[in-house]
Amino acid sequence: MTPGKFITLEGVDGAGKSTHLGFVADWLRGQGREVIVTREPGGTPLGETLRELLLHRDMDADTELLLMFAARQQHLAELIRPALARGAWVVSDRFTDASYAYQCGGRGIATERIAVLEAWVQRGFAPDLTLLFDVPPEVAEARRSAARTADRFEREADSFFSRVRNAYLDRARAEPGRIRVLDARRSIDALQDDIAQLLEELA
Ligand code: TMP
């Protein structure tokens, strides 16, 4: 059995990535693949419980980082690794790039700390493709304020999201083969043409 592939969607809150999650899944299903759609933090019953805490309870920045990776360990063990092993493709709304962007870029935790947790939990595992939905801070801010009640992250200042965005773009520059930057100001149709092309390259 050929293992499945792991695709992640990333971007600052308000970049619009979640709109495209269903498109990615439907496109892959159209190719006859079994597809699992999931998210982080979350994706398992325990992970969803941790998500509630992460999004709504005040906590120390290192506690936040550790809980993100606790949820990720469970996600990998219970859902992601078994699904890929049986040949399913897994599409996740966020993964470890979000920890580098939010906890490192946004909160200021040292990259080395995150790298230690990444090596521990992932043991070399990484997404096959990451779609990074990029928008300037003012566009993301306008989309966030039009959205539902803000969680603990969405209430952060604009400067926080600028740092998050820059950290994402730095990662994309360091790993241009895996992380593909999409200008998310463009129309949904234009973006989906590009996404389909990237998926075609992977399939
Ligand atoms: P979501 O709103 O895209 O579902 O993501 C929930 C929030 O969690 C979002 O504001 C980003 C944040 N987050 C981190 O700070 N670090 C992480 O590692 C992950 C996966 C998400």
Image (cartoon, rainbow, N blue to C red):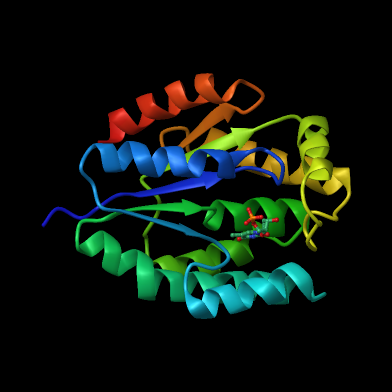
| Relative to 88, residue 199 above or below | above
Image x and y of residue 64, in percent: 70, 72
Image x and y of residue 23, in percent: 44, 37
Quadrant of the rendered image holding ligand 1: bottom right
Q: Residue furthest left?
A: 1
Left or right position of 116 against 30: right
Quarter where residue 83 is shown: bottom left
Residue, x 72% and y 46% (percent of image)?
164
Q: In the rendered image, is residue 120 in sight?
A: no
Instruction: In this rendered view, identify the residue nearer to me: 182 or 21.
Output: 21
Quarter where residue 182 is shown: top right
Q: How many marks?
A: 0
Q: In the rendered image, is residue 51 in sight?
A: yes
Instruction: In this rendered view, identify the residue nearer to me: 52 or 70.
Output: 52
Image x and y of residue 78, in percent: 37, 75
| Relative to 9, residue 173 above or below | above
Q: The N terminus lies in which quarter of the figure? A: bottom left
Image x and y of residue 52, in percent: 67, 74
| Relative to 93, residue 141 above or below | above
Residue, x 46% and y 43% (percent of image)?
22
Q: The C terminus lies in which quarter of the figure? A: top left
Left or right position of 198 against 56: left
Left or right position of 1 against 10: left
Residue, x 20% and y 55% (percent of image)?
3
